[in-house]
Image (tube, rainbow, N blue to C red):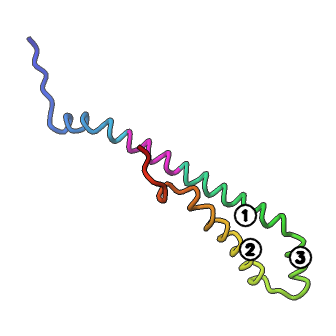
């Protein structure tokens, strides 16, 4: 009859392998989700600016400063995010049974 011995370090490493892998997998998914969200917001902002190119040009021609135009674009983008985020956030939703 053969008896297998192993150190406490090996036992602990074997016990923690699956949870560490799951934590790594969740971390990878979280980073991917944040990256996709950033790409989505950048795309929406690019679309917003592209739709208003003529209006931006007219404002600049009438004497608006760059920071004023940038502030206008950022305000509109932040307003969009402020209204879209609560609709997509799981926090305000009631728990489902």
Specify whether residue 74 is painted magenta.
Answer: no
Q: Residue at x 84, y 69 (%)?
A: 52
Q: Position of residue 71 (x, y in %)?
A: 71, 79
Q: Residue at x 76, y 84 (%)?
A: 68
Q: Residue at x 63, y 61 (%)?
A: 84
Label 2 belongs to which residue?
73
* Circle nearer the N terminus (2, 1): 1
* Circle nearer the N terminus (2, 3): 3
Q: Position of residue 56 (x, y in %)?
A: 85, 75
Tell me which segment is drawn in magenta: 22-31
Q: Residue at x 72, y 60 (%)?
A: 44
Query: Would you say 25 lies left or right of 81 here?
Result: left
Tell me if mark 1 has few (under 14), some (14-19) or many (20+) residues whose alpha carbon lies within 10 angstroms of its own.
some
Quarter of the image where one finds residue 45: bottom right
60 relative to 25, above or below: below
| CB contact under 8 Å: marks 2 and 1 | yes
Which of the labelled discs sits on residue 57, or is there none? 3
| CB contact under 8 Å: marks 2 and 3 | no
Question: Of residues 40 and 81, which is closer to you in this image?
Answer: 81
Question: Of residues 4 and 23, which is closer to you in this image?
Answer: 23
Label 1 belongs to which residue?
45
Specify whether residue 29 is painted magenta.
Answer: yes
Label 2's element?
helix
Q: Position of residue 35 (x, y in %)?
A: 58, 53
| CB contact under 8 Å: marks 1 and 3 | no
Query: For the stretch drawn in magenta, what is the main secondary structure?
Result: helix
Q: Residue furthest bottom?
A: 63
């Amino acid at each position: 009859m053969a008896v297998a011995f192993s150190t406490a370090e090996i036992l602990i490493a074997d016990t923690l392998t699956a949870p560490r892998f799951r934590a790594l997998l969740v971390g990878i998914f979280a980073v991917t989700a944040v990256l996709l969200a950033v790409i989505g917001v950048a795309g929406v902002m690019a679309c917003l600016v592209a739709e208003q190119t003529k209006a931006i040009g007219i404002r600049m021609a009438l004497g608006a400063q760059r920071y004023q135009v940038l502030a206008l674009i950022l305000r509109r983008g932040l307003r969009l995010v402020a209204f879209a985020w609560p609709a997509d956030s799981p926090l305000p939703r009631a728990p489902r049974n």
